[in-house]
Amino acid sequence: MLELSGVVLPFGVTARGVGAGADVGAADGVGTGGAEDGGSERSWSHAVGADAAGSGGAQAGIDLVVRGPERIALLGANGTGKTTLVNVIVGKLGAVRGEVRLHVPVRLLPQRLDVLDDADSVAAAAGRLAPAATPGEVRTSLARFGLRGREADRPVGSLSGGERLRATLAAIMLAGEPPQLLILDEPTNSLDLAAVEHLVSALSGFRGALIAVSHDWMFLREIGVTRWLELTPTGLADLPEEPPETTPPSAPKPRQSLT
């Protein structure tokens, strides 16, 4: 499904508006990857040398193999390059060294949810992002994420953070071949408890592999994470399958209930 071999992340370079090495939102909207040019071949790779990507990078190469519908949490302190890594995976950034091989369609939900035009209705904006989808398919996808009937006719600019996230997620699931790998970059930032619950419910129906970059430890448990990874300046490491009850230093504090 996904293979990383000796990947060294770029630091101090910029690609498509993304500051490499910094945990910032992906630019240019939704990252995609998979079969090239819409063909049937689902295996592709990209690799670049140090001269092409600029100087610097992590000291150790990153190796990772994802097979089957794993639910993976990607943890790590701010600034270690988690957003850079997911942008390298989907091809929005090149690695300094190493190779990325994707065998399935992939979608990235970026931190910055500005891919839908505020002036459009939700349905129209989602349709622009998924031009091959029929209006009925767009509305069905929006309804699956809790945006039904008149909710789909509201201007995007009137949506709350949680509603915008669900609308964007509904749209990217329709954009091109259905993804079998979904990557979420800090999806619960600025969401209240109700919005997080909507997101957890929506993700429960996704049958592909999932990689979630998040500092929200409770959210990661609620979506049923089966594998825990931590990115550090020295590489990528697997954490215990069952993390201890005490929160690791690089993990977030549990989300508190609102009163």
Image: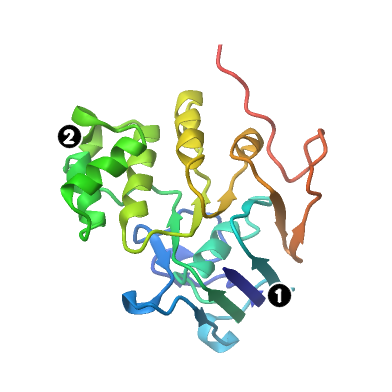
Residue at 31 percent of width and 49 percent of height = 171
Residue that badge 2 annotates: 153
Q: Position of residue 137 (x, y in %)?
A: 24, 48
Which mark lies nearer to you, 1 or 2?
Answer: 2
SS at circle 1? loop
SS at circle 2? helix
Q: Position of residue 155 (x, y in %)?
A: 19, 36
Residue that badge 1 annotates: 61
Residue 117 makes an appearance in the image: no
Badge 1 amino acid: Gly
Callouts 1 and 2 close, C-beta under 8 Å: no
Separation (CA) of disc 1 from disc 2:
47 Å
Q: Residue furthest top?
A: 259
Quarter of image, res 146 = top left
* Left or right side of 9 for 87: left
Dot 2: few (<14), some (14–19), or many (≥20) neighbours within 10 Å? some
* Left or right side of 135 for 180: right
Please state, as top left, top right, bottom left or bottom right, where the N terminus lies in the image. Answer: bottom right
Please state, as top left, top right, bottom left or bottom right, where the C terminus lies in the image. Answer: top right
Residue at 69 percent of width and 71 percent of height = 62
Q: How many marks?
A: 2
Does residue 7 sit above or below 82 in this rendering?
A: below
Q: Earlier in the sequence, mark 1 or mark 2?
A: 1
Front-most of 143 and 80? 143
Quarter of image, res 176 = bottom left
Q: Position of residue 84 (x, y in %)?
A: 55, 63
Does residue 3 sit above or below 138 in this rendering?
A: below
Q: Position of residue 217 (x, y in %)?
A: 66, 37
Dot 1: few (<14), some (14–19), or many (≥20) neighbours within 10 Å? some
